[in-house]
Amino acid sequence: MAREVWRDSADNEAASAVFHLMQQLIDRYRVNRPVMPLVVAQAADAGAGPEIDARVERVVHQVHRANALRRVPVRLLDGEGATPYEAALAMVRTLSEKPWETRENTQYKTFSFPRSRLLGAIEQATATVVEQSDGNTSEVREERILEQLSRLRWRSGRPRRGSWWESLRDSVRPETFVGALFIALLSVLLGEIDWLLTALVAAVALLGLAVVGLASRAAPPLLWLRRASRWFATTSSLAASSTGYPSDGWSWFSPSGSWRVIRARAAAVAERVADAGAGDEHARQFHLELRVQALLEDLRHNYRPHSLDWRRGKRTVPPVVFLPRATQDNGGILLINAINNVRSRRSEVDPLLLLASLPAPEIMRHTPPLPPERPGPGAPAGSSGARARYERWVDDLSLGQSPVAAATLAWVLLLPLSTEKLTHEHAHAQLVTHRVRRTWAWWVMSRASIAVLVVGSLLGAFLWAGHWRDTYCHGPLTDRNTDGIWAGEGDDRECVGVATAPEVLFARGNGLELNGAGKGITFERIEQAIREENADIEPGDAYVTVVYAGPLTATGKDRERTRKGLEELTGVYLQQRAVNKTVGRSVKLRVLTANGGEDMLRQLTAVRKIIEVARRDPSVVGVVGLGRNTDESDDATRLLRDAGLPLVNTTNSSGELPRRFPNYFGLAATDEEQTYALGLVARQIAQGLDRPHAIVLSRGDRNGDLDRYTAEQRAAGKEMLRTSGFSLGQDVSYDLAGGASLNDPLTTICQADRVPDALYFAGRVEDVPTLMAGLSGTTGCSDRRMTVFTGDDLTKGTFDDSTSIAANVTLYHSSLAPLDRGKNLGFYGDAYRTLRALHPDGEVASLASGRPAYEDELFASGQTVISYSATAALYDAAARGDKRRSAAETWATLHTVDLNNMPTGTISFSRAKSSVSDHVHGLNIVKVVRPGPSAERTLVCGKPAGVAPPLTAKECKP
């Protein structure tokens, strides 16, 4: 319930009646906005004495007090002036120039009066010129008045002298809306861009705010578009007064034409104002009514509907003016007449409500008739010619439209109060007023609410921007990319997903270099080279997109753990470069990189992002990579299958994936194929031993590395040893606690009752140095010759002094890329020359001399060659016959791929293998020993990729 703000007793019945009428008009304004009358209360008895008139005046004062504190905009006027005209004009100026009494207790902000201020500027300029007048002609006076208006900047009163510092300080104060917005924007920018650029933006913004603030006080920008200027140039009340001046009409899009209209009308009004000051009654009436019209237009504008600030919904009570004593002498009656005349002439409803008290002897009548004859402009006194009469008619037209001769005052509501009701005090009714409630529109669209909303939104955006930066690899507020996300925390954080934004480079800052002849070419440069190849594809070119997915980042600072990703990505780049630079290729190759994280532990996240990209980009035809067998490999391949994307795998040796998923095409020999070839060697070794005994040493199953490769290798290795004639001891496993922890497992093996003759190591290449150190240093094994078989491709290891083979150990491992078996030996020279162009100095080390190029460490691991071949196979299926195919068509075409001239032989997915020995994958068996200070590799046997005779024991001699 609204709070009570005023309570009093009605002195008489008339007071109660007038009070309730005014309160109904005020309080019902919110509901139906009734037409506001000019209420004039007067004693009905013309002979009533001063005491009765005083009672009527007290009624006006009582209604004023009742509404002064309840958020109703009220003004109490008391006319003062040498003449009625000056008194009435002073009251109009008071209403438009001085604050209303509810300035600090209002429903909305204080009223603005731009139209009245414009007329005030014309009055001020005219008064200045008239005071300095020295008998100039009217034309000269008009020009001087317009010059004076320009000096005043068309505003009443000279603007306060401003300075750059004051403009800047006023613009960015925190308590102002602009200041709060400025601070919030700086906060957001500081989180989005570099601090130096933020400081530069802030400095430019501060300078701009200072200029705008100073200019707004020094000059009226876009004068013809200001509300006051538009009203002044378009109101029909001034049309007749300026017909003698050239005018092209006011227009939104014609500054010069609009400016001519404004100047012409200002000159006409200034002339009439000067005449009014000289005592011309016609000019005075015109001046007063024009001032009243501007006041009413300003008030109507303050209550207009459909405004952006919802002011009509905020202001639910009308402005109320009180004239406790309106007489002819104090200008009160003249003011009421002027308001009535303007309303009658304009026929526009304004919100002003007026309550006046009229002394009993006064008669409320129209403005007294003006002198019937007066000379027209520039005509001699007494002239009665037709032209002179026309000039007078035009000059008087603005007043002639007023109903000054009507029988009644249409907008005046006269309340004759009988003496009996003014003196009857039997009721003593209690009069109460309550505070006017602010509407919901005030709370929603107030300046404070908007400031809080905007600042809150900006701060919320700042927080969201921080969240997006922590979520996405490129997550600014305005241009975030959701295809790459951050995974992990602290030093373990990696950018995982697809790099579809220029700002996302998985190898940014990764200075890991290629081996051998590739020294000096970094991981970052290879990834950037792929971007450059993509950029060279013209918008109108036909192209297919291949996504390479591999381990492109590593946690911590060990960049060596990204070598697999570096070498595989190098092979993808070599194939892309070969395709795009080959003359006659109409279908280009575009490559996107996808990071599965260190050791491919986040490959599901990467695959989901690949699928999202493929849904948006129909040019994506398949995926190359995912060359590590983990617990997530099944799910990753299944997701790609369901999305219709084929996968050409590089080094994943799983035998289950090709059997279970038709979209899986692998280039690496499976675990069964590798152990079959190793078994040819193992069987011959077992035949030379007395009671051959072997143990399988493998990684534990729950080391946090999601390694399924170890489990499959363990099973395949046990089966191989058993069929080769070895008796098997109990399996031994080791943990990964900051690295391979082999002390306890090797102690168990080497100090057992029966030390094994052979050891099948179902581990990873990075664990081999620890294994070799343990075998050469653990009692029971250090003095015993031992054979170690391993399923992982150890060509990735360099076997330098820190990773040498133990002196008492002979190691056999498979190589998935038989580089010596292929027919395309020219590939290595071409690849070397392509990579040499990426070196920052334009040169790289020469290929190893005196031996085949494929033995250079740049190619020796086989990772580059395998990924090159995989990309070539996928591209061949996607662009066969220089026709671009969809992902589904590429999947179907992959089954017919048969590439003969590849570095490792023939890449074929078209021929089904009849047995493990009759496979189409390339394979070499390598023997590594340490007869001297360094390890020595010997090729035992092998076969190229494609259809070739199966390996035999005769070829694979230990």
Image (tube, rainbow, N blue to C red):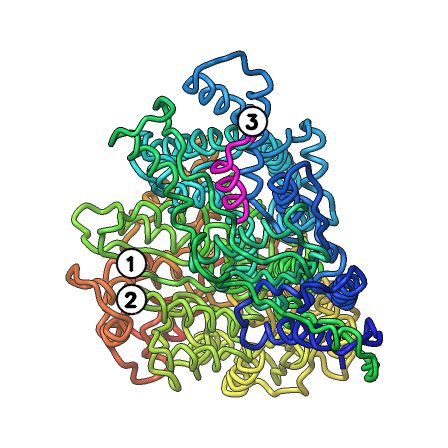
Which residue carries the number 1 mark? 902
Point out which mark residue 907 bears. 2
Closer to the camera in the image, 470 or 179: 179
Image depth: mark 3 or mark 1 in front: 3
Which amino acid does the dot numbered 2 rest on? Ile
Closer to the camera in the image, 448 or 828: 448
User: Are the residues at dot 1 and dot 2 in contact (C-beta closer than 8 Å)?
Assistant: yes
Is there any visible trace of residue 77 in the rendered image? Answer: yes
Which residue carries the number 3 mark? 125
Q: Position of residue 130 (x, y in %)?
A: 56, 21
Picture quadrant of residue 421: bottom right
Magenta-highlighted residues: 277-292
**On the picture, is 58 further left or further right than 222?**
right
Q: Position of residue 198 (x, y in %)?
A: 63, 41
Among numbered discs 1 and 2, the one appearing first in the sequence: 1
Per the image, label 1 sits on a secondary structure element best described as strand
Circle 3 crowding by C-alpha within 10 Å: few under 14, some 14–19, many from 20: many
Which amino acid does the dot numbered 1 rest on? Met
Residue drawn at point x = 51 percent, y = 37 percent: 281
Point out which mark residue 316 bears. none
Among numbered discs 3 and 1, the one appearing first in the sequence: 3
Is there any visible trace of residue 459 in the rendered image? Answer: no
- For residue 220, above or below residue 72: above
- For residue 534, above or below residue 622: above
Among numbered discs 3 and 2, the one appearing first in the sequence: 3
Which amino acid does the dot numbered 3 rest on? Ala
Q: Position of residue 414 (x, y in %)?
A: 59, 67
Q: Is 291 one of the magenta-colored residues? A: yes
Circle 1 crowding by C-alpha within 10 Å: few under 14, some 14–19, many from 20: many
Circle 2 crowding by C-alpha within 10 Å: few under 14, some 14–19, many from 20: many
Residue drawn at point x = 22 percent, y = 67 percent: 885
Q: Position of residue 638 (x, y in %)?
A: 42, 82
